[in-house]
Image (cartoon, rainbow, N blue to C red):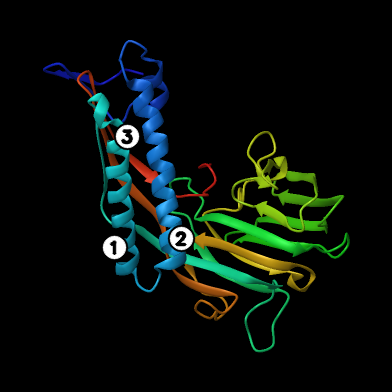
Amino acid sequence: MALAVTFIGLALVVNSAIYTQNLASRGEVAGSNDALEMRAMVETNVGQGVTAANRYNHSTQTTLETSVRESIRTVSTQTERQRVTSGTLVNVTLAGSPTYGTRIAQTNTSLFESGEATPSADWMVRERVTRPGDGTNATRRFVINATQLPSSGSEFVVVANGTGGNPKWTMRVWGDVGPSGTVNVEVDTPSGTQTCAVPIEEPYAHIDVTGGTVQGEPCLALQGGSFDGRFAHGVGDEYNITYESGDQIRGNYSMVVRDSKRAYTLDTAPASPFSTTAIYDVTVRYRYDTSNLRYEAKIRVAPGEPDAS
C-alpha cells in the first residue's frame, strides 16, 4: 500500500487512511509505536466514558452527548499530561454527533422474562435491529451475568432471527454455577454448530455474548474463525432478538442496540427489565504531535461490539 506522507518543515504528517500496522512497521519514524499505543489507550478510555454515560446520564440525548463530551475532554487532558514532559502534544475531540440507540437491561437477579403484568418466558427483546450496511453488528456489549442456570434439556435460548428469509443465529446456555460448576454455550448459525464448556468456581456465570468470552476465557462458539459464531453473524442486515425459556435462568443482562423498534413495552430505569436512550458509537479525532511526527486519525468507538464481518 502506498503511504501518503507529506513533509511540513521537520514534522512528518501521517495520513489517517494508513493502516496502523503500516505505521507501526515504520521503525525509522521515532515515536510511531508510542502514537499507536496512545491511540489504543484513547479508544479504551473513551469507550469507558460512553459506557458510563449510558448507565448514569441517559435522560435525554442532549444529556448523553454533554456527558460524553466532558469525558472526552478529560481523556484529552489526562492523556496530554502524561506526555507533555517529553515534548509530546495530544489532542482528542468529538467528531460530529454520536450515533444513538437503545440500552436494554435487567439489573436485579430475577428471571429473564418480559416486564409485563403477566410475564412471558418467550418474548421479543427488540425488533428490526438494523445494521448500517458497513459490516458492523448493530448490537454491542451484550453481557449476561447468571446466578442460576438451566439444566440440559431446559436451556435458555437467545435468537437473532433475520427478517429477510429468516436465517437464524441461536445461542443455548445451560450448566451449573458455583464450585465445580460448568457453563455450556452452544451456538447454531446458518453454517453450522459449535459448543464451548467452561469450568467455573464463582457463584455466577459471566457470558460476554458480543465479546466472545465466558468467565473471561475465549469461547470459540462465540468468536470468529473457521466457525464464525459472532452474535447475529449470517442473519442479514435486519434481525429480531428474542429470548426463549427465560423462566429457566436468573440474573442480570445488558445490551446496546442501534436502529431498532420496540417489541415489548419496557419500563424506564430502575425497574427491570428496562430500556433507555443510549449512545451506540462515537467518532473522535485523535492527534499526536512530536518534533518528528504528527499522527492524525478518526477513531470510531463502540465498546463491546464484535469485529465487522
> Most extreme residue toward the bottom, as rendered?
117
Q: Which residue is mark 2?
A: 258
Q: Quadrant of the N terminus?
A: top left
**What residue is at 36 percent from the left and 14 percent from the top?**
26
The vertical placement of 74 against 12, above or below, is: below
Is 241 positioned to the left or the right of 185 in the image? left
Query: Between disc 2 and disc 3, whose residue precedes?
Result: 3
Q: Is residue 14 among the parts visible in the rendering? A: no
| Quadrant in the picture for residue 222 | top right
Q: Residues within 10 Å of mark 3 (few under 14, many from 20)?
A: few
The residue at the point 61 percent across, 57 percent down is 143
- Of the pair 19 and 1, the residue shown nearer to us: 19
Amino acid beneath label 2: Arg
Q: Position of residue 224 (x, y in %)?
A: 63, 38
Residue depth check, mark 1 versus mark 2: number of the one nearer the observer:
1
The circle drawn on residue 124 is: none
* Within-10-Å neighbours for mark 1: few <14, some 14–19, many 20+: some
Distance, label 3 to label 1, CA atoms, is: 25 Å
Mark seen at residue 66 = 1
Q: Which residue is mark 3?
A: 82
Q: Position of residue 267 (x, y in %)?
A: 53, 81
Q: Relative to 77, is 33 above or below?
A: above
The amino acid marked with disc number 1 is Thr
Looking at the image, tell me whether mark 3 or mark 1 is earlier in sequence order. 1
Label 1: which secondary element:
helix
